[in-house]
Image (spheres, rainbow, N blue to C red):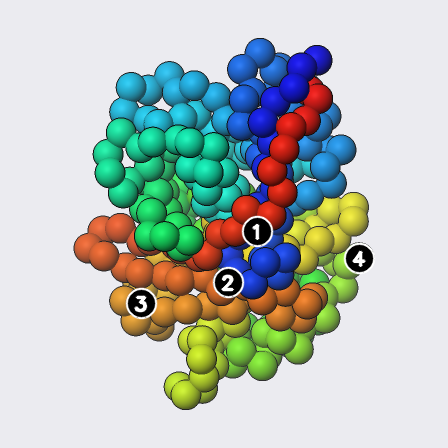
Amino acid sequence: MGRRKYSEVNVFSPTPYLGNPLAVVLESEGLTGDEMQRFAKWTNLSETTFLLRPTDPVADYRLRIFSATEEFPFAGHPTLGSACAWLEAGGMPKNSGIIVQECGAGLVKVRVDNQRLSFAAPPLTRYEPIEEDLVHRVARALGIPRVDILDTSWLVNGPEWIGVRLATAQDVLSLSPDPTKLGSLAIGVVGPFESDHEVQFEVRAFLGGDPVWEDPVTGSLNAGLAKWMADSGISNQHYIAAQGTVIGYHGRVHVTVEDSDIWIGGDVTSCIQGEVNL
């Protein structure tokens, strides 16, 4: 056990402590996967990340991402939060303005624009309509009639999201899922605001398990939703999505579609810096 640089950062919100928190261990060489998993469980945050030397010469660093129970090949807010912590610890990108992260999903580009960072969404590994019997199960879990669901899609880019589109943002805000019916599903729901609203969409993310969890702000889900809505002609080339409203957060996800890239961005603030014995 030794002292390692450590940060906790606030991701996807312009307001400190109202975004999604992330724990980052900046000097993780020598730690085993079991040790990382144990520490991630102890932090009790949605994700904890560990920075390592890259194995790919193109990358600036390698990232391992853990929830309290498992390792992910990719996740959105850990990508942005880890990039922020790395920069604040003195990291210098090989290419000015672009960080290249190596993770289980491959190489991910992170664009730097002051406090706002954006990642280029990795390709979806499963992207197809949800089978009808599962759509009915999703409707029951969300506590709404099947007819209220306008469209669905698998949006898998690490986490196995089920995307659900409702008619309005208010429909999304009004959801009260039944924890006994969620099972192990990961459901992301999106609906549009009226045209004069400050943001264009409201997003909520529900993850079944023990306990059932509503994520404050979710980069991987918003990346999948952005691809789906752009392909469906639902969204513009640039929009802002709100998330976390119902549970007291102020998440803001900035989405930009540029040619074949979808950039998912947000403000990131470092809240805690120090050391951890690990």
What residue is disc 3 on?
Answer: 238
Residue 108 to residue 172: above or below: above
Q: Nearer the viewer, residue 78 or 6?
A: 6
Q: Residues within 10 Å of mark 4 (few under 14, many from 20)?
A: few
Give coordinates of residue 106: x percent, y percent: 37, 30
Q: Quick one: SS at disc 3?
A: strand
Structural distance between the alpha carbons of marks 1 and 2: 9 Å
Task: Count residues near mark 1 (Cα–Cα under 10 Å), then give few for <14, some for 14-19, many for 20+.
Answer: many
Under circle 2, the secondary element is loop
Alpha carbon of mark 3 to alpha carbon of mark 1: how far? 23 Å
Q: Report how far apart the C-alphas of labels 4 and 1 lie in the structure.
A: 31 Å
Vertical placement of residue 271 versus 73, above or below: below
Mark 4 or mark 1: which comes first in sequence?
1
Question: Residue at (60%, 38%) from the top-left corner?
Answer: 273
Name the residue that disc number 2 marks: 14
Residue at 78%, 46% in the rendered image: 210
In this figure, which residue is indicated by the disc labeled 4? Answer: 180
Tell me the kind of residue under disc 3. Answer: His
Cβ atoms at labels 2 and 4 below 8 Å apart: no
Q: Earlier in the sequence, mark 3 or mark 1?
A: 1
Dot 1: element: strand
